[in-house]
Image (cartoon, helix red, strand yellow):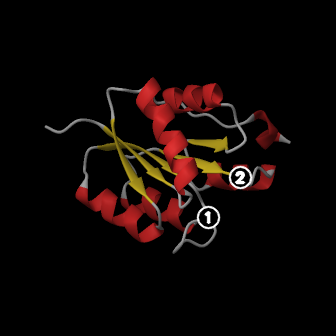
């Protein structure tokens, strides 16, 4: 059996690198994978049945709106998805939740808040910023 895996899907290499560094420091028990487009996200999900969490940027090449989130939730409903986005509008956060995201982390969040949110989702809970209720 392979090791549990976290998949980071974001088209910005610098942000991916920072998030991977955070994941390796806080969750050393997990392998990590990267995807930089909707296409590589789909391929990674097909090739790695041991993915336990997808950290997903909504704005990647090959994705429109919530299409990647809807794809992952529809094809892999057992895998929780946390949206990580620079678009922090409460309407976007609520839509992500309505479309099945287990969490939403603004890219402006502190690393400690990101780690806490990821930990909660891995434990089966959800995490959304308070502003989503506005």
33 versus 12 height, above or below: above
**How far from the left and from the top, in percent, is residue 81?**
49, 47
41 versus 111 height, above or below: below
Q: Residues within 10 Å of mark 1 (few under 14, many from 20)?
A: many
**How far from the left and from the top, in percent, is residue 129?**
72, 36
- Residue 4 in the figure: left or right of residue 80: left
**How far from the left and from the top, in percent, is residue 113?**
64, 28
For image coordinates 86% across by 42% down, the residue present is 134
105 versus 45 height, above or below: above
Q: Which residue is mark 2?
A: 86
Badge 1 element? loop
- Residue 36 in the figure: left or right of residue 87: left
Counting residues from the start of the chain, the first of labels 2 and 1 encountered is 1
Q: Which residue is mark 1?
A: 59
- Residue extending farthest right: 134
For image coordinates 51% across by 32% down, the residue present is 22
Q: CA distance from mark 2 to mark 1?
A: 9 Å
Q: Nearer the viewer, residue 27 or 100?
A: 27
* Badge 2 vs badge 1, beta-carbon distance below 8 Å: yes
């Amino acid at each position: 059996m392979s090791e549990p895996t976290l998949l980071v899907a974001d088209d910005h290499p610098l942000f991916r690198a920072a998030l991977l560094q955070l994941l390796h420091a806080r969750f050393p028990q997990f392998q990590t994978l990267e995807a930089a487009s909707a296409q590589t996200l789909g391929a990674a999900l097909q090739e790695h049945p041991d993915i336990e969490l997808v950290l997903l940027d909504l704005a990647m090449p090959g994705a429109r709106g919530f299409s990647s989130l809807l794809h992952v939730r529809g094809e892999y409903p057992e895998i929780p998805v946390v949206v990580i986005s620079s678009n922090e509008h409460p309407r976007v956060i609520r839509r992500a939740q309505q479309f099945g995201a287990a969490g939403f982390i603004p890219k402006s969040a502190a690393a400690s808040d990101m780690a806490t949110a990821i930990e909660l989702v891995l434990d089966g809970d959800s995490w959304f910023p308070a502003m989503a209720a506005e």
